[in-house]
Image: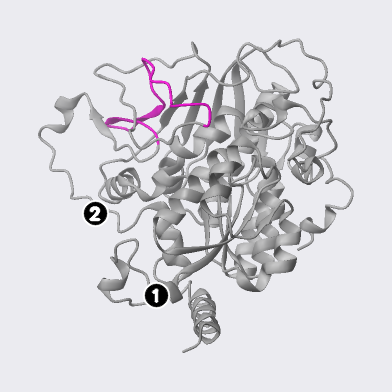
Amino acid sequence: MTNSKMNNNRRDFLKKTALGLGAITIIPSHVIFAKPGSVAPSDKVNMAFCGIGNRGGQIFRTFMGTGMVNNVAMCDTDMGAKHTLRSIEAYPNVPRYQDFRKMFDEMGDQIDAVCVGTPDFSHFPITILAMSLGKHVYVEKPLTRTFQESELLMEAAKKYKVATQMGNQGHSDANYFQFKTWVKEGIIKDVTKITAHMNSARRWHGWDVNMKDFPKGQPIPETLDWDTWLGTAQHHNYHKDFINGQWRCWYDFGMGALGDWGAHIMDTAHEFLDLGLPYEIDPVYIEGHNPLFFPQSSTLDFKFPKRKGMPKCTITWYDGVNNQPKLPKGYGESKLDSNIPAASTGKIEKRKLNPGKIIYGKDLTFKGGSHGSTLEIIPREAAKEMNLPEVPKSPSNHFVNFVRACRGEEKTRSPFEVAAPLSQVFVLGTLAQRLNTKLKFDRETKQITNNKFANQLLVGTPPRKGWEEFYKL
């Protein structure tokens, strides 16, 4: 068989399996549980990578480490910068692009799936274009920066019927299967209160909270395509505090501590307690409010109504180094998940209280960390006499799960139908931070009812001229 015919057969296979993603498919166990690296070259998924430095580079290397992916294109607005050189040097012969639109124009017929590891605000245009072209998509968390963009991606997932996965990798680890099992078996029940906390120092901590304007422009690095980096965002002059992770500091570009860590802390409770969207978001404490960048500390109450026999529930989010929640009796040691990826600026700092959650049920209280960390019942004595159910093992990590979904062998565990509403919760929280005001939200109409300006921000500012098309796909 010629290489051309073999590749055509592989693409036909991927397209056919993609059409059956919604169906129950019986796959031989030797395929489902195949070890990474055992996939025949002709059956590997042809993947393009948008964002190949910093966190995008970490995701890129993890996908390549599965042995189930062909790297067919690499795209980054800063080709040749220090943070992208490692990826470029590892694959010097793979086509490189600085504009994802050009990449799709020239290589669309050679791409099966796309990995989006770019700044929060730029997820949407890359993802929606890829989906409209029939490409499976893996998108780093949070899914989008605006409420409407998540809404559009949910609709696109139904329309284009491609495999989708948001990159909250703990959603394929032990915590996911434990939480799911403990809810099903009635161990976790009648939850009325959840505390979610992330108290490590952030990039914007210590900034002048009286800042009135964005920083003045600086010379654009020769390797950077600044216009494409801006994408749908309104024009800003280049500044080093907008790139390489610094974008997370600004409401215009990122989602702060909540968008960064919420998807690793609140995800399983949100899905398996069927929380959906809150009816009220209250910024009960804001320290260092500024309309341009995120607070030094914040406490947010997300209030969810009764649903499917479950009581009302409030998630209280804490961020800020010293803004830590009160811990219940018997809490014990705060553990740090060893699987947390290192930040682009170094390792996650271990603190007295590491990122995590406390879940208060009617009869039991649970503590947990972030990502894949499993829950403990506290105090420990409460669990001694309990006959806890067996929790199934994960058949695949988050990345292998996505690749297998592209091949029609598994369903993704964080598809847009699950990930988008979770991301919308974060959008509502960041709006409450930005405006420093309580927001009332109608879950049926998906509108903010007590603040017209906040309601307009669900859609966000209009896209920059020339980028409107992505909202019509």
Q: Nearer the viewer, residue 449 or 293?
A: 293
Where residue 392 is drawn, which disc sits there?
A: 2
Q: Is residue 190 visible?
A: yes
The crowding category of the residue bearing disc 2, from other C-alpha atoms within 10 Å (few below 14, some 14 to 19, many at least 20), is: few
Q: Amino acid at mark 2?
A: Pro
Q: Label 2 to label 1, Cα distance in Å?
A: 20 Å
Residue at horizontal 34%, vertical 27%? Answer: 336
Mark sitting earlier along the chain (2/1): 1
Q: Is residue 411 visible?
A: no
Residue at horizontal 65%, vertical 40%? Answer: 119
The crowding category of the residue bearing disc 1, from other C-alpha atoms within 10 Å (few below 14, some 14 to 19, many at least 20), is: few
Q: Secondary structure at mark 2?
A: loop
Q: Give x and y (percent) for residue 331.
A: 27, 20
Which residue, given by chain and number where applicable, does mark 1 sit on? 24
Tell me where residue 354 sits by quadrant. Answer: top left
Residue at horizontal 52%, vertical 80%? Answer: 7
Where residue 292 is drawn, which disc sits there?
A: none
Q: Is residue 158 left or right of residue 241?
A: left
Q: Give x and y (percent) for residue 189.
A: 32, 41
Magenta stretch, residue numbers: 344-370
Residue at horizontal 77%, vertical 57%? Answer: 470
Q: Give x and y (percent) for residue 378.
A: 24, 26
